[in-house]
Image (spheres, rainbow, N blue to C red):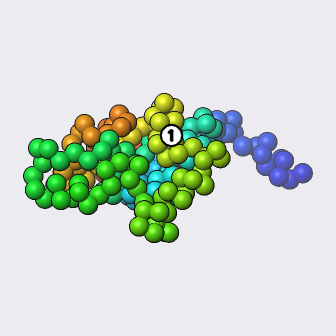
Amino acid sequence: MSSTAALATVPATSTAERITKLEDELEVLKQRMPDDKVSIILLSGDFDKAMAAFMMANGAVAMGMEVSIFFTFWGCSVIKKGRKLQGKKFTHKLINLMLPGSAKDLAPSKMSFGGLGRKFFNYMMQGSMSSLEEQIEIAKESGVRFQICAPSLGLMGFDADEWVVPVDVCGVAAMYDVALNARTAYFIS
């Protein structure tokens, strides 16, 4: 009873000020709340890790989320059209010869067995799971945003037109702009 009486004696302006302050604090919290987005950073060029990245991306899109995948270093091989050597300097040709030419050439991180591992996985996936190439196409058609690390392009000698999907060439700051505003962020290495 005494607490009710104490509340009744609080001046109306004090209550109004408190409500205004709470509304301001709520607005700040709303602005800090992450968007309904998923950010995936793909460092790995391994088949199984690329499959995981695209399955997560396509699943999130199916749930109505906005998805962005940032490809850096070895991960760039996942969305390359193929091996392009013409017009590159010697060191970039060497890098491109050592890396997989496209998603079709990616080996699994474990059980590679000199190329047999990928064939085995492809066989096991037939009829029950979309191939990596199909997953990439689904992501492209679903509106997944693809970002390519600009420093990786320069270091590894990739050109802006080597990709099977439309890409935004950007730096780490653009990747962070997406990742820090996403509800969920994954780093796959």
The residue singled out by tag 1 in the image is: 134
Residue depicted at 35% across the width and 34% down the height: 166
Q: Amino acid at mark 1?
A: Glu
Residue depicted at 77% across the width and 46% down the height: 7
Say which of 50 and 87 sits in front: 87
Residue depicted at 45% across the width and 69% down the height: 113
Residue 143 seen in the figure: yes
Say which of 147 and 133 sits in front: 133
Please give left or right for residue 153 compared with residue 114 in the image: left
Please give left or right for residue 76 compared with residue 2 in the image: left
Q: Position of residue 112 (x, y in %)?
A: 46, 66
Please tell me whether residue 42 is drawn above or below residue 134 in the rendered image: below
Residue depicted at 17% across the width and 47% down the height: 85
Q: Position of residue 5 (x, y in %)?
A: 83, 47
Q: Callout 1: 10 Å neighbours few (<14), some, many (20+)? A: few
Say which of 135 and 35 sits in front: 135
Say which of 28 and 15 sits in front: 28
Please tell me whether residue 154 is drawn above or below residue 144 in the rendered image: below
Q: Dot 1: what SS?
A: helix
